[in-house]
């Protein structure tokens, strides 16, 4: 007997090897795994279930994977508009992050997890923060799947700027705290929470920190992630200090590998792109953050070529400070962005974009065989989109509508490990009202601590 059957799906996008799309499709689930995928009459006959969910009028997809999100940045919306990379980091986001109390961070993480989940995300990779135990606790208790990491820096000042004093630690301290996070959190919450190593960026990390973090990742069988090539500034400071660009430096340190996740890679050179292919490095594109603050990741970027050559490129919403935390909208932006800058309408087809948000995201999370598709044996992570909404009309091709027309607002049901976490658009495992109330209550205090109030006030007279 199956635990759960989702049936009568108008359109079931399997993302399996053949990319089958099933009309009147069904999925049977047992012990958190997919037991069967097929036409409703066949699956219903073979797999009686304790609970049946009707997906009539729905498009069913694998749960979306947000491959790059800063959960502690959710309270930073509006704090970093109209600023370039250096100002963004050193005058806005680092001061914000340094000002967060543990209770502020918790409010931010809860708000972030709520928004991700309601928008159909079942797995996310947190970019690394100072409260990874809180991210693990909130996401784990909400029933989601995630990767967490403790943030590491060991160089206080670079050509990019000077870090807040509370971020500064020695290489040994950074390594010890990072490994402790992996020991404590990896595999927790029924295996849904993974913990990795992380260095926040190359310009604030010594060679030794990078090499040792990679060694720890290998020893613990986990991943290691960092931001790389995200702006002209980061590329130029790497050249000035190390004589090579960022990914070339990683190659020189001998750390490029299949368990390495590089975020952005927008400014990667031809030579760096070929290193990514050679070492099966995983990458993430984060279109809204580049579009919001003009980093040039789409204009300079090579996501279509990386995908064409078989490199895994996931999709990330990055942070609320660029506005959007909605993978559906990120899908539109990466598709539209590449078409626009290349004046090529075929530069980024919607099928390829949906693969980024599912199959490639699964590979980025180093769970390529477990999630990302609706196939027998994979974990039962699904999103059901309600097509009885104006933006879904008319519906000829669900992949096109999903990428070009839908937003996370049309997510009706979200399931992780066969457990229903969102139903009828309502989160079942998180108290939405309390989370929003807490965010509203804490915002003025956070703003006061950052001292950014004058900079982010409305530009027009308020009376
Ligand atoms: Zn980031």
Image: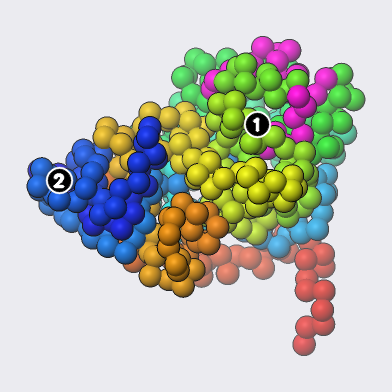
Q: Which residue is mark 1?
A: 305
Region of the chain picked out in magenta, as a range = 244-270
Of callouts 2 and 1, the N-terminal one: 2
Can you tell me whether the CB of the residue at mark 1 lies under 8 Å from the nearest atom of ligand 1?
A: no
Residue at x-position 82% and y-position 82%: 461
Location of residue 220 in the rendering, given as x and y in whole percent from the top left corner: 47, 19
Image colouring: rainbow
Q: Is residue 130 above or below residue 327?
A: above
Answer few, some or many: residues within 10 Å of disc 2's Cα (few below 14, many 20 plus, some between 14 and 19).
few
Q: Which residue is mark 2?
A: 42
Residue 245 within the segment the image draws in magenta:
yes
Residue at x-position 49% and y-position 15%: 219
Residue 268, picture quadrant = top right
Between 196 and 231, the one nearer to me in the picture: 231
Residue 64 within the segment the image draws in magenta:
no
Q: Is residue 285 above or below residue 5?
A: above
């Amino acid at each position: 007997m199956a635990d759960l059957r989702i049936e009568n799906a108008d359109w079931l996008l399997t993302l399996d090897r053949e990319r089958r799309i099933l009309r009147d499709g069904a999925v049977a689930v047992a012990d958190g795994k997919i037991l069967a995928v097929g036409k409703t009459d066949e699956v219903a006959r073979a797999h009686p279930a304790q609970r049946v969910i009707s997906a009539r009028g729905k498009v069913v997809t694998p749960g979306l994977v947000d491959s790059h999100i800063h959960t502690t940045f959710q309270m930073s919306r509006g704090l970093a508009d109209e600023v370039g990379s250096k100002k963004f980091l050193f005058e806005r986001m680092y001061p914000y992050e340094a000002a967060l109390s543990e209770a502020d961070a918790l409010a931010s993480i809860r708000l972030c997890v709520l928004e991700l989940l309601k928008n159909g995300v079942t797995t996310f990779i947190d970019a690394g923060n100072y409260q990874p135990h809180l991210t693990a606790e909130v996401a784990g208790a909400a029933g989601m799947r995630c990767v967490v990491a403790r943030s590491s820096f060991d160089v206080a000042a670079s050509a990019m700027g000077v870090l807040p004093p509370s971020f500064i630690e020695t290489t040994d301290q950074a390594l010890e705290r990072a490994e402790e996070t992996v020991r404590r959190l990896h595999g927790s919450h029924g295996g849904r929470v993974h913990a990795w190593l992380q260095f926040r960026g190359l310009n604030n990390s010594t060679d030794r920190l990078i090499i040792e973090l990679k060694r720890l990742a290998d020893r613990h069988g986990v991943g290691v992630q960092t931001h790389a090539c995200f702006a002209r500034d980061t590329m130029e400071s790497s050249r000035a200090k190390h004589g090579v660009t960022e990914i070339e430096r990683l190659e020189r340190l001998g750390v490029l590998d299949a368990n390495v996740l590089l975020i952005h890679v927008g400014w990667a050179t031809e030579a760096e792109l070929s290193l990514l292919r050679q070492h099966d490095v995983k990458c993430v594109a984060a279109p809204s953050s580049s579009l919001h603050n003009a980093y040039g990741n789409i204009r300079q970027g090579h996501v279509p070529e990386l995908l064409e050559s078989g490199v895994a490129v996931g999709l990330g919403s990055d942070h609320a400070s660029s506005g959007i935390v909605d993978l559906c909208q990120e899908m539109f932006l990466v598709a539209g962005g590449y078409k626009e800058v290349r004046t090529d309408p075929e530069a980024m087809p919607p099928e390829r974009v949906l693969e980024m948000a599912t199959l490639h995201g699964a590979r980025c999370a180093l769970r390529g065989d477990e999630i990302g598709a609706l196939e027998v044996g994979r974990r039962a992570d699904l999103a059901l989109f309600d097509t009885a909404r104006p933006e879904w009309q008319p519906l000829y091709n669900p992949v096109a509508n999903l990428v070009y027309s839908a937003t996370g607002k049309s997510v009706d049901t979200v399931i992780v490990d066969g457990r229903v976490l969102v139903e009828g658009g309502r989160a079942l495992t998180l108290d939405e009202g309390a989370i929003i109330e807490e965010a509203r209550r804490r915002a003025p205090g956070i703003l006061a601590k950052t001292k950014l109030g004058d900079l982010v006030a409305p530009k027009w007279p308020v009376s």
